[in-house]
Amino acid sequence: MSARGYARDLAALRADLEFEIAAVKRYGRMAEEAGDPQLQALFKELSVGETGHWRGLRRTIATVEDSATPVVLFCPLCGWQVDFGPDPADGATGKCPMCPGRFALRLDAGGDWTLERLAP
């Protein structure tokens, strides 16, 4: 999956990443301010968990942005994966390996990949 064609996905992932970063900071501050040792431990544990989410989201974003990762969309007819390979051009064609569906890959105005069904 190259970054081109995944505008909405990347926007959502980046928003989630911002949330996780803010949560790590918030839980860290709450742990510092908590007077109860058990409450401190809980906030620290939550911060560690959010840190894991933060790292996972960064890895996912890097994968989406990597032009070597293939563009794979789901066949709207049967739900199987249609692989267009890495960094395809607008208009690239592909066939579902499980059903007779044939598609052209289109880049919509919002910057996302869509599938246009082609005649059999």
Image (cartoon, rainbow, N blue to C red):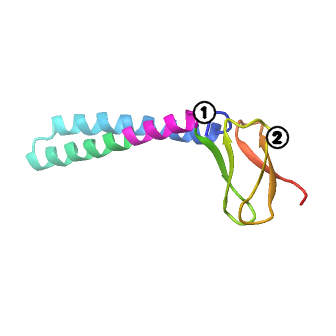
Q: Quadrant of residue 81?
A: bottom right
Q: Amino acid at mark 2?
A: Gly
Which quadrant of the rendered structure holds the N terminus? top right
Q: Which mark is residue 67?
A: 1
Q: Which mark is residue 108?
A: none
Nearest to the observer: residue 83 or residue 114: 83
In screen coordinates, is 55 left or right of 109? left
Taking 70 as reference, is 118 above or below it?
below
Task: Identify which residue is drawn at 26% across, 41% down.
Answer: 47
State which region is magenta.
55-68
Could you tell me how far apart the alpha carbons at marks 2 and 1 are, in whole angstroms? 17 Å
Label 2: which secondary element: loop
Task: Identify which residue is drawn at 22% across, 38% down.
Answer: 30
Q: Quadrant of residue 10?
A: top right
Crowding at dot 1, Cα within 10 Å, few <14 / some 14-19 / many 20+, comes out as: some
In screen coordinates, is 64 left or right of 34? right
Contact check, label 2 and label 1, Cβ < 8 Å: no
Which quadrant of the rendered structure holds the C terminus? bottom right
The residue wearing badge 2 is 91
